Image (cartoon, rainbow, N blue to C red):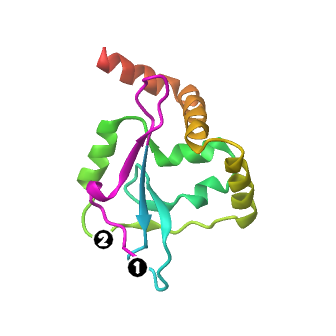
Amino acid sequence: MRAITNDYKDAQILNLGSGGADGPYLVMQTGVDPKAEIPKTHMFVLRPDGRWADFNAYACQGKPEAMDEIVFPSLPQVMETFGKLSGRPQVAHLSVDETGLKKWLERQEQQNPLEGARAWAVEYKTRHGRQYDRLEGQRG
């Protein structure tokens, strides 16, 4: 079991955009909390505040808005956050509702996870429309 790091090379950056659109982005890393007394592998996500969290703590909440906290609107914001990280990774210890997680996992069996993530991203862009309008304006 390998501990997570703050090195961007150890993470996966997923573009959840669809139809050729950029973002939002999800940053993931599978590994062990470096401070865990009992090492257990988790899928961690990097939040824009620079802390890592267990993805399941968000997935179990059963509401799309919960995921808004763990994505980055643009790739430059991902890189900016990585640039601020130093030392051991800081992990936000959040509770996981096992019942909610079971429901989420059941829903994932019925759909392609990547398509589910992209459908969520469309909703995210709708909720955060002005922010994306500004980003699109900067590119044009």
The answer to whether marks 1 and 2 mark residues whose Cβ atoms lie closer than 8 Å is yes
Q: Is residue 67 left or right of residue 23?
A: right
User: If the image is split into quadrants, where does the C terminus sit?
Assistant: top left
Q: Quadrant of residue 9?
A: bottom left
Q: Which residue is mark 1?
A: 35
**For the residue carrying disc 1, how many other residues have a C-alpha within 10 Å: few (<14), some (14-19), or many (20+)?**
few
Quarter of the view holding residue 127: top right
Q: Main secondary structure of the magenta part?
A: loop
Q: Residue 17 versus residue 36: which sits nearer the camera? A: 17
Query: Magenta segment range?
Result: 1-25
Q: Earlier in the sequence, mark 1 or mark 2?
A: 1
- Percent x, y for residue 37? 46, 85
Q: Going 38% across and 67% down the picture, which residue do you hit?
A: 90
The N terminus sits in image quarter: bottom left
User: How far apart in space, not on screen, are marks 1 and 2 (Cα)?
Assistant: 9 Å
Q: Which residue is mark 2?
A: 88
- x 57%, y 29%: residue: 122
On screen, residue 74 versus residue 64, left or right, reads left
Instruction: Tell me the crowding category of disc 2: few under 14, some 14 to 19, or many 20 or more residues within 10 angstroms, Cα based.
Output: few
Whether 15 is among the magenta residues is: yes
- Residue type beneath disc 2: Arg
